[in-house]
Amino acid sequence: MDLSSQVSLARRFYEPILQDKYDNPVPRKRDLEQIEQLAARFADRQSLLTQLALDPPESTEDFAGPPLLDEDYLILSTIHSAKGLEWDAVYVIHAADGNIPSDMATGNDEQIEEELRLFYVALTRAKNHLYVCHPQRYYHANRGGFTDRHSYAQLTRFIPPPLKAHFQTYLATPHDAHQSPGAPVAATLTGRQIRSQIQAMWS
Protein backbone atom coordinates (compact mmCIF):
# COMPACT_ATOMS: atom_id res chain seq x y z
CA MET A 1 0.00 0.00 0.00
CA ASP A 2 1.45 3.36 -1.00
CA LEU A 3 1.94 6.19 1.47
CA SER A 4 -1.02 8.26 0.23
CA SER A 5 -3.35 5.29 0.78
CA GLN A 6 -1.95 4.79 4.29
CA VAL A 7 -2.62 8.43 5.18
CA SER A 8 -6.09 8.14 3.62
CA LEU A 9 -6.86 5.21 5.95
CA ALA A 10 -5.65 7.22 8.95
CA ARG A 11 -7.77 10.21 7.90
CA ARG A 12 -10.91 8.09 7.54
CA PHE A 13 -10.21 6.57 10.96
CA TYR A 14 -9.89 9.98 12.64
CA GLU A 15 -12.82 11.76 10.95
CA PRO A 16 -15.56 10.35 13.24
CA ILE A 17 -13.30 11.02 16.25
CA LEU A 18 -12.95 14.66 15.16
CA GLN A 19 -16.73 14.91 14.85
CA ASP A 20 -17.12 13.60 18.39
CA LYS A 21 -14.31 15.49 20.13
CA TYR A 22 -14.43 18.97 18.59
CA ASP A 23 -17.22 21.53 18.26
CA ASN A 24 -15.82 22.56 14.88
CA PRO A 25 -14.02 19.62 13.23
CA VAL A 26 -13.98 21.01 9.68
CA PRO A 27 -10.57 22.80 9.86
CA ARG A 28 -8.90 19.71 11.31
CA LYS A 29 -10.44 17.52 8.62
CA ARG A 30 -9.03 19.89 5.99
CA ASP A 31 -5.58 19.70 7.58
CA LEU A 32 -5.67 15.90 7.33
CA GLU A 33 -6.77 16.12 3.71
CA GLN A 34 -3.85 18.45 3.01
CA ILE A 35 -1.40 15.96 4.55
CA GLU A 36 -2.97 13.20 2.45
CA GLN A 37 -2.30 15.23 -0.72
CA LEU A 38 1.30 15.87 0.36
CA ALA A 39 1.85 12.18 1.01
CA ALA A 40 1.53 11.43 -2.71
CA ARG A 41 4.88 13.21 -3.25
CA PHE A 42 6.88 11.01 -0.87
CA ALA A 43 8.08 7.43 -1.04
CA ASP A 44 7.82 6.61 2.67
CA ARG A 45 6.57 7.91 6.02
CA GLN A 46 10.02 8.94 7.22
CA SER A 47 10.51 11.28 4.25
CA LEU A 48 7.06 12.79 4.73
CA LEU A 49 7.50 13.34 8.48
CA THR A 50 10.97 14.84 7.95
CA GLN A 51 9.56 17.31 5.44
CA LEU A 52 6.63 18.21 7.70
CA ALA A 53 9.00 18.83 10.61
CA LEU A 54 11.33 21.03 8.54
CA ASP A 55 8.69 22.88 6.56
CA PRO A 56 5.20 22.39 8.03
CA PRO A 57 2.29 23.29 5.74
CA GLU A 58 0.05 26.21 6.61
CA SER A 59 -3.02 25.30 8.57
CA THR A 60 -6.22 25.59 6.60
CA GLU A 61 -7.44 27.82 9.40
CA ASP A 62 -4.93 30.46 8.25
CA PHE A 63 -6.77 31.02 4.97
CA ALA A 64 -9.53 33.60 4.69
CA GLY A 65 -13.02 32.21 4.66
CA PRO A 66 -16.19 32.01 6.70
CA PRO A 67 -15.50 32.67 10.38
CA LEU A 68 -14.96 29.40 12.21
CA LEU A 69 -14.71 28.92 15.95
CA ASP A 70 -11.96 26.60 17.09
CA GLU A 71 -12.41 24.62 20.31
CA ASP A 72 -9.91 26.93 22.01
CA TYR A 73 -12.42 29.77 22.00
CA LEU A 74 -14.32 30.57 25.15
CA ILE A 75 -17.92 31.34 24.29
CA LEU A 76 -19.85 33.50 26.73
CA SER A 77 -23.59 33.22 26.31
CA THR A 78 -26.81 34.00 28.10
CA ILE A 79 -29.12 31.06 28.67
CA HIS A 80 -31.64 32.53 26.24
CA SER A 81 -29.01 32.80 23.49
CA ALA A 82 -27.83 29.23 24.09
CA LYS A 83 -31.13 27.64 23.13
CA GLY A 84 -30.64 25.07 20.38
CA LEU A 85 -26.84 25.08 20.72
CA GLU A 86 -24.46 22.53 22.25
CA TRP A 87 -20.87 22.56 23.46
CA ASP A 88 -18.49 19.88 24.63
CA ALA A 89 -18.16 21.54 28.06
CA VAL A 90 -20.54 24.02 29.66
CA TYR A 91 -20.01 26.09 32.80
CA VAL A 92 -23.19 27.46 34.35
CA ILE A 93 -21.98 30.29 36.57
CA HIS A 94 -23.64 32.05 39.52
CA ALA A 95 -26.12 29.22 40.10
CA ALA A 96 -27.16 30.83 43.36
CA ASP A 97 -30.66 31.72 44.42
CA GLY A 98 -31.28 35.30 43.37
CA ASN A 99 -29.55 34.71 40.06
CA ILE A 100 -31.07 31.34 39.19
CA PRO A 101 -33.95 31.92 39.64
CA SER A 102 -33.60 35.65 39.27
CA ASP A 103 -34.93 37.55 42.25
CA MET A 104 -36.85 39.64 39.69
CA ALA A 105 -38.75 36.57 38.48
CA THR A 106 -40.05 34.92 41.62
CA GLY A 107 -43.30 36.82 41.96
CA ASN A 108 -45.52 33.84 41.19
CA ASP A 109 -45.42 30.14 40.33
CA GLU A 110 -45.49 30.78 36.58
CA GLN A 111 -42.37 32.95 36.74
CA ILE A 112 -40.52 30.35 38.81
CA GLU A 113 -41.56 27.62 36.35
CA GLU A 114 -40.17 29.70 33.49
CA GLU A 115 -36.89 30.15 35.40
CA LEU A 116 -36.76 26.38 35.94
CA ARG A 117 -37.23 25.81 32.21
CA LEU A 118 -34.37 28.22 31.49
CA PHE A 119 -32.13 26.39 33.96
CA TYR A 120 -32.99 23.12 32.21
CA VAL A 121 -31.94 24.70 28.91
CA ALA A 122 -28.60 25.74 30.45
CA LEU A 123 -27.87 22.26 31.82
CA THR A 124 -28.74 20.47 28.59
CA ARG A 125 -26.33 22.49 26.42
CA ALA A 126 -23.44 20.26 27.54
CA LYS A 127 -22.49 17.25 25.41
CA ASN A 128 -19.82 15.74 27.65
CA HIS A 129 -18.95 17.95 30.64
CA LEU A 130 -21.23 20.07 32.80
CA TYR A 131 -20.05 22.34 35.63
CA VAL A 132 -22.54 24.20 37.82
CA CYS A 133 -20.75 26.91 39.81
CA HIS A 134 -21.96 29.10 42.62
CA PRO A 135 -20.16 31.45 45.02
CA GLN A 136 -20.03 30.80 48.73
CA ARG A 137 -20.10 34.50 49.60
CA TYR A 138 -20.97 37.86 48.10
CA TYR A 139 -18.71 40.63 49.38
CA HIS A 140 -20.17 44.09 49.83
CA ALA A 141 -18.54 47.23 48.52
CA ASN A 142 -18.51 50.75 49.83
CA ARG A 143 -17.00 53.93 48.45
CA GLY A 144 -13.50 52.76 49.31
CA GLY A 145 -13.91 49.42 47.52
CA PHE A 146 -14.68 45.95 48.77
CA THR A 147 -14.66 45.22 52.50
CA ASP A 148 -14.76 42.06 54.60
CA ARG A 149 -18.52 42.46 54.97
CA HIS A 150 -20.28 39.67 53.13
CA SER A 151 -23.43 37.59 52.90
CA TYR A 152 -23.57 33.88 52.21
CA ALA A 153 -24.90 32.61 48.90
CA GLN A 154 -27.25 29.67 48.63
CA LEU A 155 -27.16 27.13 45.82
CA THR A 156 -30.14 27.51 43.50
CA ARG A 157 -33.37 25.96 44.75
CA PHE A 158 -33.48 24.06 41.45
CA ILE A 159 -30.78 21.70 42.77
CA PRO A 160 -32.32 20.36 45.99
CA PRO A 161 -30.32 17.89 48.14
CA PRO A 162 -31.67 14.72 46.43
CA LEU A 163 -30.56 16.09 43.03
CA LYS A 164 -27.30 17.49 44.38
CA ALA A 165 -26.36 13.96 45.43
CA HIS A 166 -25.89 13.15 41.73
CA PHE A 167 -23.23 15.87 41.37
CA GLN A 168 -19.56 15.66 42.28
CA THR A 169 -18.84 18.58 44.61
CA TYR A 170 -15.60 20.54 44.58
CA LEU A 171 -14.46 23.50 46.64
CA ALA A 172 -12.30 26.11 44.95
CA THR A 173 -10.44 28.06 47.63
CA PRO A 174 -6.80 29.07 48.22
CA HIS A 175 -6.72 26.36 50.90
CA ASP A 176 -7.33 23.71 48.24
CA ALA A 177 -5.00 25.17 45.61
CA HIS A 178 -2.47 22.40 46.23
CA GLN A 179 -5.01 19.73 45.39
CA SER A 180 -5.06 18.24 41.93
CA PRO A 181 -8.04 18.98 39.67
CA GLY A 182 -10.91 16.71 40.50
CA ALA A 183 -9.81 16.18 44.08
CA PRO A 184 -12.66 15.74 46.57
CA VAL A 185 -13.77 18.58 48.78
CA ALA A 186 -11.55 19.06 51.79
CA ALA A 187 -12.90 18.25 55.21
CA THR A 188 -14.16 21.08 57.39
CA LEU A 189 -11.28 23.29 58.49
CA THR A 190 -10.10 22.95 62.04
CA GLY A 191 -9.84 25.96 64.34
CA ARG A 192 -6.04 25.85 64.08
CA GLN A 193 -6.22 25.90 60.25
CA ILE A 194 -8.61 28.84 60.31
CA ARG A 195 -6.36 30.80 62.67
CA SER A 196 -3.36 29.98 60.48
CA GLN A 197 -5.13 31.25 57.37
CA ILE A 198 -6.25 34.45 59.09
CA GLN A 199 -2.72 35.06 60.36
CA ALA A 200 -1.34 34.51 56.85
CA MET A 201 -3.77 37.08 55.45
CA TRP A 202 -2.44 39.81 57.76
CA SER A 203 1.25 38.91 57.85
Image (tube, grey):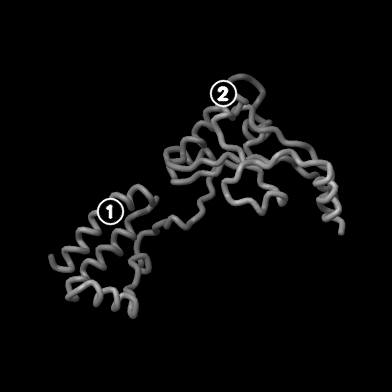
Q: Local crowd at mark 2 within 10 Å, few (<14), some, or many (≥20)? A: some
The residue tagged with tag 2: helix, strand or loop? helix
Say what amino acid the circle numbered 1 marks.
Glu
Q: Classify residue 127 as left or right of residue 186.
A: left
The quadrant holding residue 135 is top right
Judged by depth in the image, the label closer to the viewer, 1 or 2, is 1
Residue at 62% over, 26% down: 161
Secondary structure of residue under mark 1: helix
Where 41 sits versus 116, above or below?
below
What residue sits right under mark 2 in the picture? 113
Residue for badge 1: 15
Q: Amino acid at mark 2?
A: Glu
Q: Earlier in the sequence, mark 1 or mark 2?
A: 1
Distance (Cα) linking label 1 and label 2: 42 Å
Image spot of residue 146 (x, y percent): 81, 50
Indicate the quadrant containing the C terminus: top left, top right, bottom left or bottom right: bottom right
- Judging depth in this view, the residue of 118 and 26 nearest the camera is 26
